[in-house]
Amino acid sequence: MELDEKWGTKYPMVIKSWQNNWENLSGYFKYSGPIKRVIYTTNPIEGLHRQIRKFTKTKGSFTSINALYKQVYCAIKKAEEKWMMPISDWALTISQLDLFFPDRLKIELN
């Protein structure tokens, strides 16, 4: 069943947008699972923001600006722990990236 046949009547604007922008959208589907995990989960700014929100969202308000600073400091220290963790299946991921971008990676695999 075609996407348009199944969802076109319920979501006509979305289907039209997909059809008009398919060339740009389809680029995301060409990568394998290990590459997608690296692309979609390693945005450091978003990850840090998520950690800070996790620490601060349970507080309704802070007693002082220093109390907020302490919470943000703790969140950053917690996030730093994850920055030191290796990326899972890195050897597989880097070899697949080398297939997609052969002249751009200058990493020697051991």
Image (cartoon, rainbow, N blue to C red):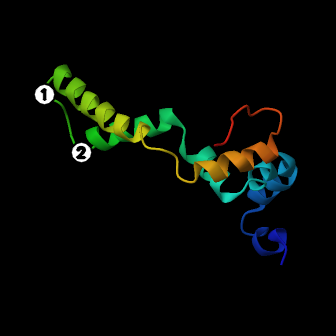
* Residue matched to label 2: 58
**Neighbours of disc 2 within 10 Å: few (<14), some (14-19), many (20+):** few
Image quadrant containing the C terminus: top right
* Residue at 29 percent of width and 32 percent of height: 77
Question: Eyeballing the image, is 93 above or below 55?
Answer: below
In this picture, residue 51 sits left or right of residue 62: right
Q: Which of marks 2 and 1 is nearer the N terminus?
A: 2
* Kind of residue sitting beneath label 1: Thr
What residue is disc 1 on? 63
Image marks 2 and 1: residues in contact by CB distance under 8 Å: no
Q: Position of residue 76 (x, y in %)?
A: 33, 31
* Mark 1 burial class by Cα count in 10 Å: few <14, some 14-19, many 20+: few
Q: In which quarter of the image is residue 5?
A: bottom right
SS assignment at label 1: loop
Q: In terms of image quadrants, where is residue 61?
A: top left
Query: Horizontally, is 85 left or right of 17 in the view?
Result: left
Q: Position of residue 30 (x, y in %)?
A: 79, 54
Q: Which residue lies furthest to the left in this view?
A: 63
The residue positioned 81% from the left and 53% from the top of the image is: 26
Identified at 73% across, 45% down, the residue is: 97
